[in-house]
Image: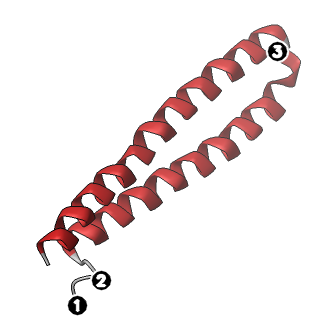
Amino acid sequence: MDSVLAMSALAAGIAVLTCAGAGIGQGYATGKATEAIARQPEARGSIMSTLLIGAAVAETTAIYGFIIAILLLFANPLIK
């Protein structure tokens, strides 16, 4: 029982790392989109829409990782 709790805590910590990865990815994408808009201001609309879709996907990944971490810590299905 203790080893299951310990491994669940470790897995929750790893799952939370998805938040850091999503933050880094969104920052990188925003920087590149800013560079692209600076080079071609007339393409601003298509660049921004693509950026927002990518940011939504990255943010969804972070939220899924956070939800998995919360489930492993507070509503662990492996214990029952």
Name the mark nearer the viewer: 3 or 2.
2
In the rendered structure, the answer to whether residue 80 lies left or right of residue 60 reads: left
Q: Position of residue 39 (x, y in %)?
A: 82, 9
Residue 46 to residue 36: above or below: below
Q: Position of residue 27 (x, y in %)?
A: 54, 26
Residue drawn at point x = 25 percent, y = 77 percent? 76
On the image, numbered disc 2 is attached to which residue?
A: 77
Give the farthest residue toward the left. 2
State how far apart marks 1 and 2 are (Cα): 6 Å
In the rendered structure, the answer to whether residue 9 lies left or right of residue 48 reads: left
Q: Which mark is residue 80?
A: 1
In the rendered structure, the answer to whether residue 44 lies left or right of residue 18 reads: right
Q: Quadrant of the C terminus?
A: bottom left
Q: Amino acid at mark 2?
A: Pro
On the image, numbered disc 3 is attached to which residue?
A: 41
Q: Position of residue 42 (x, y in %)?
A: 88, 19
